[in-house]
Amino acid sequence: MRLVRRGLRILGCAGAAVIVLAGPSLASATGTVNAAVTAVNTEIGAKIRPYEKLYERTTTRTRALPAQPKQALLQAASALSAELGLAQNPTQILDANLSPEVAGRLANVLTDLLACHRLTEPAFAAIPPGLLPAVLTTGGSLNPAAYTGIRLCGESAWQSTNELELAVAEESNAAAPGCQALGQVNLDIWPVLRVDGACRDNRYDNDYLLTLDVGGNDTYANNAGSNLVDVNFSPAGSAVPGLRGTGPAKGCQRAIPGLTALDCVPTAAVVLDLQGNDVYGVKQSPDHDTGCTNDPVVRRMMTGGAGFLGVGILRDVEGDDTYTGKTGALGAGHIFGVGILSDGAGDDTYRAVRNSQGFALVGGVGVLRDEAGDDSYGFYMPAPIDPNAPNQTEGAGGVRDDEGEGLCDRIPRFTQGAGNVAGATGIFLDDTGADSYHGAFVLEFVGPFQVPSTRAGSLGFGNNQGLGVFLDRGAVSDQYTVDDEPTVAGVPKRGDNVTVQPNNESTGSGFGQGLFVDQ
């Protein structure tokens, strides 16, 4: 298995993943974000403009379909499975009740993910083991120009995902009832392709590269649009077994040690779920975080539209959804990766421990965009086993950090539009609705493999030359709770109808740039 052999040389996990959840309504407020940011700060508007194709949606289908859509889909699935070392010839695709339009759009997404995978794999393998700690925290000696292709591939995968959404929504609108638009299609070609065309209420415990789910109230206990994919555990009945057996995916719960052990590997993935009240991320009793807390946690790092040296996209278009992550989750990009979480409609809830919700680290781009609904954003912090234990000691609470096997870190930080370390750009966008926000600041925290950082914040905050942008454009009242937000003379506190400009201690003065805008 070429991927695993290369992965043994390094300590990271990366790839491309996409989740799309569409519904019958495709109304969008796209095309105006950059104008809104530029209107309040031209410098920040110019800085996020290169990423416009990542935070705006494509609303028309312009890419050509393959000449033989089902055959193209079969070939793309075969190629991806072979490159993962789990080769298959999924001829059941030819018998599936898929229209040429939907089959062709699926093939386009898989083809893009194959291209992204082929960028990520050699980039991942090229990082020497001894350099990875420095790369994870500072970018090491990596040249940002060498990773432009990942961003461009992310743009292409995002476009093909949008076009797949449009195609499926069109067939849903033409059908009665809409959830039967794809008939009783049921494709399960682990770990490459999963299609449910009948609106079942599914629980996804294994990782896939592309999942199309037409509807139903689904639970994603897997990678959920993260490019860190677990090929160790396959579902029962899979044509090929997992490398370590059958059962629920575990993924990367540990940082460097987990990556070294190939608990997850770099590849490409997509999920499309058309509608329903869905759950992304499931709290369980601690596994790797045992010793820090007894509280239930999401065990895996980097889930829910997260990209590590690759592309990860989660798109949910309709439903009252619940998003829960751990760290590096819910629209997060790391090491020049692209992570996108895009939600179209519904009253949604977002929670993670830290480094999430439109967060980026070390040259990455992380985007969280919610287009409509009365939404709630915040963090959860697992309670300590020993209330008297100092932070970063056993029993201190929180979850483990990235250093060695991990110290217990209970400091909340970097959520809702935050960037940390040079070149990182975290973008948080909420278009409409009466929303509630809970973020946190800390004057100093100790990061793994680095000197103490003088600042960490949320809600439009940049640190160590990173950029964080927060924009809420809803014309209704929003509620803000911001723990330990610094008081700066002449600078307003974050709140409804407030703008906090960059270059002060509340947005990362001297160490990065943040912009907070509530309109």
Image: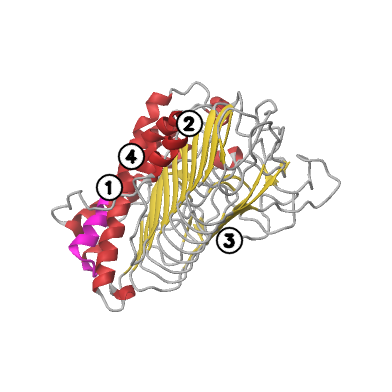
Which residue does the numbered mark 2 point to in the structure image?
Answer: 363
Looking at numbered disc 3 in the image, what kind of residue is underneath it?
Val
Instruction: Give the main secondary structure, helix, strand or loop, of the magenta stretch.
Output: helix
Looking at numbered disc 2 in the image, what kind of residue is underneath it?
Gly
Which residue does the numbered mark 4 point to in the structure image?
Answer: 153
Q: What is the distance, in whole Å, between disc 1 and disc 3 at their CAs?
A: 30 Å
Which residue does the numbered mark 3 point to in the structure image?
Answer: 282
Q: Nearer the viewer, mark 3 or mark 2?
A: 2
Element class at badge 2: loop
Element class at badge 3: loop
Residue at the outermost top position: 141
Mark before the other along the chain sequence, 4 or 1: 1
Q: Nearer the viewer, mark 4 or mark 1?
A: 4
Find the magenta span and give its range.
95-108
Q: Residue at x 20, y 60 (%)?
A: 101
Image location (x, y in percent) of residue 469: 51, 39
Mark before the other along the chain sequence, 1 or 3: 1
Mark before the other along the chain sequence, 3 or 2: 3
Looking at numbered disc 4 in the image, what kind of residue is underneath it?
Cys
Q: Which numbered tag is attached to residue 460?
A: none
Look at the numbered discs 4 and 3 and tell me whether their residues touch, using CB distance below 8 Å.
no
Q: Quadrant of residue 15?
A: top left
Look at the numbered discs 1 and 3 and tell me whether their residues touch, using CB distance below 8 Å.
no
Image location (x, y in percent) of residue 100: 18, 62
Mark 3 is surrounded, within 10 Å at the Cα level, by few (under 14), some (14 to 19) or many (20 or more) other residues, namely some
Assign the N terminus to one quadrant of the image: top left
Q: Would residue 274 appear left or right of 102 to someone viewing this image?
A: right
Image location (x, y in percent) of residue 243: 47, 52
Which residue does the numbered mark 1 point to in the structure image?
Answer: 111
Q: Residue at x 13, y 53 (%)?
A: 67
Rendered position, 4 above or below 91: above
Looking at numbered disc 1 in the image, what kind of residue is underneath it?
Thr
